[in-house]
Amino acid sequence: MTLRQVVRNANVFDSAAGQLRPHSTIVIEGARIATVTSEPIEVDDATVIDAGGRVVLPGLIDAHVHVVAASHDLVKLAMQPPSLVSAESSRIMRDMLMRGFTTVRDAAGADFGLQEAVERGLFEGPRLFVAGFPISQTGGHADMRPKGVRSREMFCACAGLGLIGAIADGVGEVRRAVREQVRNGANQIKIMAGGGISSPTDPLEGTQFSLDELRAACEEADAANLYTMAHAYSPRAVTRAVQAGVRSIEHGNLIDEATARVMKAHGAYLVPTLSTYVALADEGQRLGWSPSMLEKLDAVKTKGIEAVRIARAEGVPVVFGTDLLGHMHDRQSGEFDLRLAAMSPVEALQSATIVAARLMRLEGQIGQLVKGAWADLLVVEGDPATDLKMLAEPMTGVRLVMQGGRTVRSSLPA
């Protein structure tokens, strides 16, 4: 028998319209939403949840996480036994769910095993969409080999959990690398299209992969009905990636107006990750980051919010992402506060709901409280149209978390 639940006395957030629908009722059948209505409705044989006039939001979406990143030391992480990485990942995912993130897009590292563990209920965590290994050129952002290491098989013993890249050079190798991620159940393909902060040898503003290689990656992803996400910072790297067919740009701190117009013309999304720069600025030196890495961090940490302003002004959709590592995952909810310097509370909330769902091609499934969507919802204190403090402090501000019709936690009155 399918479990029926009713959420009454709810001010429902319509994420597509960016408006609250007062005096609403949500009817849930099993794991899905059956009805959302402001009309009086009687439902037999249902468990009733009284929202008490509080706002009900769709479950949140973080579109750039690394659930296996239990440490900031990515090389050391790659050498850990996969059983230990999985155990640490289970804790990270559980904490994300408790904050109200019912779906996350993993930006490389997690595999189909973690995804299935969540689906089976072995691990408690967000609905997980995986990229598998990130694809990097030799010397690219996910080529973590120290200088002097010649073998491409340095991490061949790694069991597939971690952030070390699949190194591919030339169109043929890139196609093969993408096909390998597809074979192993990737939901999206992650490529490194420009330099990065945490990698030891690549210049931040450089470009990576030839245009033919970038196009090959996008073509292979499209052939499998997937899409490509690209790590890139500089205007040149972002422009090349988008022109090659990349759907989402990760980070993008250094974009300018001309780049944003190219993104808009190609229908690309921007996924800023502001919280990771704040965290690393606070802790990078203590964590042993090299002077060159800290120099690169300094070049981008103040630019992220300006990139959000530029993207919004040019009509580029902006999506919620965090990109945190190790103990810094605890800062995930703080991303909302950081975005308010360039977005209204409603826009920031949409970036973590409907806009993220559109990026992931899951509109009507997640990020919305509509008939047929997964019954992922949060009951929160306060008015998110004016203030997102309840999301920035979720353990007190979020009173109920439901995922797929199952109440994960609740502090609502009985």
Image (cartoon, rainbow, N blue to C red):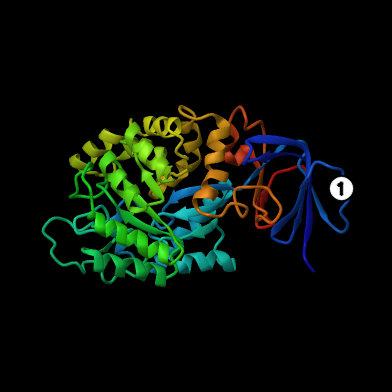
Picture residue at 19% right of the left edge, 48% below the top:
202
Q: Decide which of 19, 75 is in the foreground and name it.
A: 19
171 sits to left or right of 2: left
Identify whether 56 is placed above or below 174. Answer: above
Quadrant hosting residue 77 = bottom left
Picture residue at 87% right of the left edge, 59% below the top:
45
Identify whether 406 is placed above or below 354. Answer: below
Q: Decide which of 282, 12 is in the foreground and name it.
A: 12
Quadrant hosting residue 279 = top left
- SS at circle 1: loop
Q: Which residue is mark 1?
A: 41
Say what amino acid the circle numbered 1 marks.
Ile
287 sits to left or right of 353: left
The x, y position of residue 234, in whole percent, is 27, 40
Picture residue at 53% right of the left edge, 67% below the top:
117
Quadrant showing the N terminus: bottom right
191 sits to left or right of 121: left
Identify whether 169 is placed above or below 47. Answer: below
Q: Decide which of 147, 241 is in the foreground and name it.
A: 241
